Image: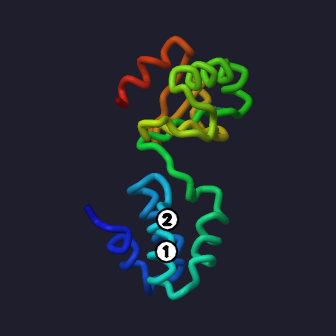
Amino acid sequence: MPSCLDIISPYRDKPGGLIEAYHAIQRKYNYLPEEAVSEAAKVFGISEAQAYGVATFYSYLSVKKRGKYIIRMCESAPCHIAGADEVLKALEKELNIKVGETTADGRFTLELTECIGQCQATPVLSVNSEPVFDVTPQKVPEILARYK
Ligand code: FES
């Protein structure tokens, strides 16, 4: 398994390399582990505070540990009207976490998202980047079971 340093090093001399490196790390781990931020500081010759500053500046980067599967419930109006709130409650109950949290086994993180362009089949959620259509509270256990 490649280390954080192996993943970061190829971006050293590229324009915007730090952000690209963080993206590559996040594709692998779903978040930026502490080790990645300190390795990035060394590779790019900046202070750890600067590397951390970049890691926390962009909303699409996360330094908070996230699960293997990131479930994002769409909260935009069409999904909201179609019952996204009830689905969200079912997800929280089934996973035993609140939005923004990760299950104790590190499997799932629950987040919210804006419209993902699939309004023909509301309510919609995504698991990592895969959309799941016409979700109901009743379907939640079966959906989660696919990712065990
Ligand atoms: S509003 Fe939810 S996918 Fe468009």
Taking the image as four quarters, which one is ligand 1 found in?
top right
Q: The residue under label 1 is which amino acid type?
A: Ser
**Relative to 112, is 35 on the left or the right?**
left
Nearer to me, 24 or 79: 24
Q: Is residue 34 visible?
A: yes
Q: The residue under label 2 is which amino acid type?
A: Glu
| Residue sitting at x 50%, y 47% | 66
Q: How many marks?
A: 2
Under circle 1, the secondary element is helix
| Residue sitting at x 43%, y 25% | 144
| Residue sitting at x 62%, y 25% | 88
Q: Residue 79, percent across and down?
A: 66, 26
Q: Label 1 near label 2: C-beta < 8 Å?
A: yes
Q: Which residue is mark 2?
A: 34
Q: Residue 120, percent across and down?
A: 59, 26
Q: Residues within 10 Å of mark 1 (few under 14, many from 20)?
A: some
